Image (cartoon, helix red, strand yellow):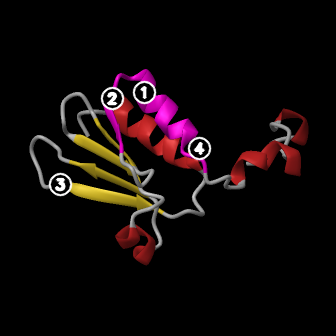
Amino acid sequence: MNTPSSLLPAPVRPTAEDRSWLSCDHSAEPVLTLLDSLGWPMVDTPEANVHCTSPDGRVYVGWLPEDPGAWQRGIVWRIRVQPADTDAWTQEFSIHTPSEAVTGFLAALIANPTR
C-alpha cells in the first residue's frame, strides 16, 4: 500500500539546542525534586550522599556521588525495588546518565506501582 506523502506526518528533526537535556550536568536536582514532591523521606549523609525511600518502603533511591563502592562500579544512582509478590531487583545508573532520564525511569515506575 502506498500512502501519498501529503498524508504522512512531517518528520521531526530536533536541533542540537532541543537536545540540550541529553548532556549530563551531574545534578541530582530533577530526581530529588520529584521524590520530594511525592513526600518521600530523604536522608543526607555527611559525605553528600542522599537516600530516599518510598512511603510504603518498597522503593529505595540512592544518589551516591561520594560512595567509594558505587564509584568502583561506575554508578551514582541505585534504585532498589521490593515488589510485594516477587524477588527484589536493582537498577543502577552511571554518572553519564542524564538525571532527567533517571527521573523519567522513576516517574514510570511510580506511575505503575503494581508492576
Mark 3 lies on a secondary structure that is: loop
Distance of label 2 from label 4 (alpha carbons): 18 Å
Question: What residue appears at the point 26 percent right and 40 percent down from the top-left corner?
Answer: 115
Relative side of 10 to 40, left or right = right
Q: Is residue 17 above or below residue 64?
A: above
Distance of label 3 from label 1 (alpha carbons): 23 Å
Q: Is residue 22 above or below residue 104?
A: below
Percent position (x, y) of residue 91? 36, 58
Q: Is residue 86 visible?
A: yes
Q: On the image, numbered disc 3 is attached to which residue?
A: 88
Callout 4 amino acid = Glu
Distance of label 2 from label 1 (alpha carbons): 6 Å
Mark 2 lies on a secondary structure that is: loop
Q: On the image, numbered disc 1 is attached to which residue?
A: 36
Q: Residue furthest bottom?
A: 72
Nearest to the eye among marks 3 and 1: give it: 1
Callout 1 amino acid = Asp
Nearest to the eye among marks 2 and 4: give it: 2
Question: What residue appears at the point 81 percent right and 36 percent down from the top-left corner?
Answer: 9
Q: On the image, numbered disc 2 is attached to which residue?
A: 40
| Quarter of the view holding residue 44 | top left
Of labels 2 and 4, earlier in sequence is 2
Q: Is residue 2 visible?
A: no
Distance of label 3 from label 2 (alpha carbons): 19 Å
Relative side of 1 to 50, left or right = right
Q: On the image, numbered disc 4 is attached to which residue?
A: 100
Of labels 4 and 3, earlier in sequence is 3
Q: Is residue 47 above or below residue 82?
A: below
Callout 3 amino acid = Ala
Percent position (x, y) of residue 60? 28, 45
Percent position (x, y) of residue 55? 23, 28
Would you say the residues marked 2 and 1 are in contact, meaning their CB atoms lie under 8 Å apart?
A: yes
